[in-house]
Structure formats: structure tokens, C-alpha cells
Amino acid sequence: MSTATSLAATARTLAADYDHPAILALYLDLHRHPEISHAEHATAARVAKELRALGIEVTENVGGTGVVGVLENGPGRTVLARADMDALPVQEATGLAYASRIDGLMHACGHDMHTAMLVGVAQALSRGRQHWSGTVLFVFQPAEETGAGALAMRADGLLKRFPRPDVLLAQHVSAGPVGLVAHVEGPVLAASTSIDVVINGRGGHGSRPDTTVDPIVVGAAVVGRLQSIVAREIAPRQSAVVTVGRFQAGTANNVIPATAELGLTVRSVSGELQDQIVTAIRRIVTGECSAAGTPAEPDIRIVKSMPATVNDTRTARRVAQTHREMFGAAHIIDPGPAMGSEDFSELAVRPDGTPIPYHYWFLPSTMAPVWDAAPGASPLEKFARVPSAHSPHFAPDPAVLGQGVAAMTGAVLTELNEMT
């Protein structure tokens, strides 16, 4: 079995052989032409064309617009490397020369960069087949932003129709100084639950509130009380977020409406904690409605949920060690878990229900002038003040493309060489 040092050297050799100008051009084109979740048609077609040009077996329309490339190269393990492809309904405000040309759509989460990076990895591995043995699955996933893409690919037979992976790998650009690679063992991203609440009051004239049950007043009490969940029901050592992102009610200043609607998002780093918080939300909403004497029970509906992303410890340590050898120990950091959410872990379930180990890491990518100009004496203070994912100003440095190709190439080689 190859040592970490030799793996790192091989990864550097292979990654240096990808077509740098072509991958940069691919990234810039994808950024100019973003496509929303479930509609990544041109992106998927471009990816399929690039993979076929490398002699990789390609299957399109997996789980909608998903693309799967299979590169078989002798006996050995099977490694799945994944990139997401969808953009967001955000109006770009970066002012970049290659900014989105599609009104109201933007690659505000870096998925265009992930896609270009993985095509670069496919180039590196297909051109350097003499350096490795096994099978690599290149998975380009649609609809990560809706939380539905991974499940759709799995439901369409991703883990039945193609070689069964022994391990899954993914990476994501983030805010932070270029040159670092962020690895976390165990929980790295939070579970996420979106909840819609309808408070059923009794409407009437604004001059006669005594004849009504005002759902706005009830809703305001609910919003305030929900903030006590994390503050008073969750242990301080645990991380959790309860946010009310939507509160809609009424149509006129002098009318008390019959209903009020709340939209919530819940984040935590474990399924058990997530269940505890959702149970508390149901209790609080129902209790406040009961206290106000609403004429009907509230409607509480879970509209979307994603599990926590929990890295396999042994896989994380192996990949991080290779990256230390590739990029230098000073460039490998452990920022701890984040409260963002991902559907990547939905791919890591075998048809029989058993889990597949995986590792997911971050590539800080804030352009140097933006990072340097951000106020703050410490990296943590600067991090809070630079544009992050989903911001209309989020603009990853294209220089990170090469680092991403190298990082994923090194990770794939590490896992191909791991003894089962």
C-alpha cells in the first residue's frame, strides 16, 4: 500500500496534468449561465460531453438531470466523488466580468466551481491511469439546494445501477483565506428541518379586537417563545438554531386577519437533538394557540428535512493526512461543525439500508483583496464580515480551482489505496 507521502506526490503529479485553461473556461461559462435546481439541463449536457471526451462511460438523466461517469481501471476499491450543479434564485451583485447573465439566478454557493473541479479530477485520473487501480464514480448531482437531488439519484438506482462505492467524497468552497483546507471529524454540517405553521384565529374589524382572536398577537408570542428553546432547553455544549424566517399575515391596516403563517428553519448536529427541538416547537405553538383560545388547532407541517452530515472519522483522518503532505500541515484546519446543511449524506445509504462511510471538507476561497480589506484583527472576525455562501456578493477565487482538483485527486487516490 502506498504511503501518505507517495500518495501526495502522485496526486500532485496527476493534478498538474489537468487542462487548466479548459477548466477555468468551463467554470467561467457555468458561472455566466446558472441553472436553478431540477433544471440543470445545459450544465449536465456540458459535463457529459466533457467526460465522454475522456473515454469515461457516461449515464445522463439520473434522478432528473444528474450525470454519472464511471471510470474503471482494473481491480480495487470503488470511490464515489460528488459535485453539485444547481444555482440559486439570487440576483448577482459581485460586479465580476463573468457575472451571471441570467436575471435573478446566480451560482451563489459555488456549485459551478465544484462541477468544474470534478471535471478536472476526471481529466487528471483518466490521463494518469498507470498510477492507480480501481473504479471511480464521478457523480454530478442536481438540486442540492432543495434537498431533493441526492434522494432522487438514489431512488433512480445510483447505488444499484452502477458499481457499489466503498466510500464517498465531496468538497465545498467557503468563505475564508485561500490556501487552507478545512477538515472535521464527525459532525461537520447540521441537520435541517423546515416547518410551516398556520395559526388559525378569528378575523374581524381592527376597531373591535374583542370580537376576534388575533393570530398576529398569537404569532408574535410564538416567535418570542420559540427563542427560549435553544436558550433554556438545549444543553450549552450542544449547537442548535431555531430561526423564524417568514411571518406573513393580513392585507389591510384596519383588518385583523383570520390566519397568520410562520416559516421556520431548525438546525442541530444530531438527529436526536433535532427531534427534541421539533417536539418543543409543536408544544409551544399548540400551547400558545390554546392559551389564546384560537377556534381551531394550528396547522404544523414539516416541508423539508435533511440529516446531519457526519464524517467517518477514519476516512477523514486518512484524507486530511494526505492533504497535509500535499499542502503543508499549516494549511489544514479544523473549524468544527457548521450550521449549514447538505443532502450529500443521503447518497451514503446502501440499498439494504446500511451506511457507507464518507468525508466532506471545505476549501476557503475568499479573494485576497476582499479578505485583506475585511475589518477585524483575527481570522474569526474577518470571517464574519466577508461574503459567504448564498450572498449576492459571494465570489470564490478562481485560483481555488487548482487546489480543488488537487485536493479531490489526492482524496480519491487515498481511498483507492486504502486496504479493505
Image (spheres, rainbow, N blue to C red):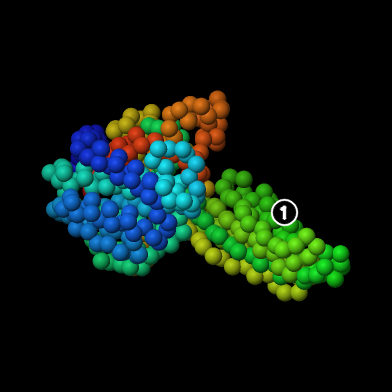
Decide: few, some or many residues near mark 1? Use Cα within 10 Å; few <14, some 14-19, many ≥20: few
> Outermost residue, bottom direction?
296
Find residue 276 and report its horizontal and vertical position in percent.
Answer: 59, 59
Above or below for 147 versus 419: below
Q: Which residue is mark 1?
A: 224
- Between 315 and 24, the one lying in front of the other is 24
From the viewer's perspective, tell me whether residue 315 is left or right of residue 176. left
Which residue appears at 33% of the width and 29% of the height?
Answer: 328
The quadrant holding residue 317 is: top left
Find residue 283 and report its horizontal and vertical position in percent.
Answer: 68, 64
Above or below for 353 versus 126: below
Find residue 215 and report its horizontal and vertical position in percent.
Answer: 75, 65
Which residue appears at 36% of the width and 57% of the height?
Answer: 40
From the viewer's perspective, tell me whether residue 101 is left or right of residue 375. left
Number of labels in the image equals: 1
Above or below for 55 versus 121: below
Residue 314: in sight, yes or no? no
Find residue 235 and report its horizontal and vertical position in percent.
Answer: 62, 49
Which residue appears at 32% of the width and 56% of the height?
Answer: 42
Above or below for 12 versus 257: above
The quadrant holding residue 218 is: bottom right
Tell me the quarter of the image containing the N terminus.
Answer: top left
Residue 50: in sight, yes or no? yes
For badge 1, the amino acid type reads Gly
- Between 37 and 139, the one lying in front of the other is 37
- As helix, strand or loop, the secondary structure at mark 1 comes to helix
